[in-house]
Image (cartoon, helix red, strand yellow):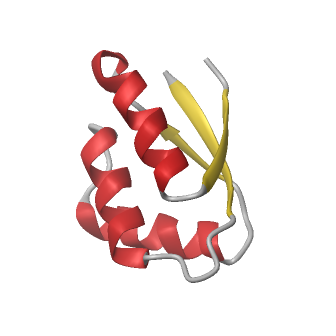
Amino acid sequence: MKLNLLSCDAQSPDRRAIAKCIAEVSPNISESLSIELTDILLEGDAVDIEVKDKNSGSTLRALRKLSIDYEIIE
């Protein structure tokens, strides 16, 4: 499943938790790339990631918990 991460609405977003979440849910994103994608997301630009279908429900819950707005592409 592909997701488009649109924005983070948290007052004080936890960069480390967001980067860890991205790295854990996407099989082809390394830890360093997840940190870079987190920075891009928090600057206000959208980020596309691919998520393991097996964990899609827990992934969406984790993103909501981090106050990340997303849209499902596929």
Side of 33 where 6 appears, left or right: right
Image location (x, y in percent) of residue 68: 60, 54
Image location (x, y in percent) of residue 36: 45, 72
> In which quadrant of the rendered view does residue 27 lie?
top left
- Rendered residue at 41%/23% (across/down): 57
Image location (x, y in percent) of residue 54: 29, 16
Side of 42 where 34 appears, left or right: left
- In the picture, the quarter occupied by the C terminus is top right
Q: Residue furthest bottom?
A: 12
Q: Nearer the viewer, residue 28 or 73?
A: 73
Q: Nearer the viewer, residue 66 or 55?
A: 66
Q: Is residue 34 above or below residue 26?
A: below
Number of marks: 0
- Rendered residue at 34%/54% (across/down): 21
Q: Is residue 38 above or below residue 3?
A: below
> In which quadrant of the rendered view does residue 11 lie?
bottom right
- Rendered residue at 50%/64% (across/down): 37
- Rendered residue at 43%/76% (across/down): 14
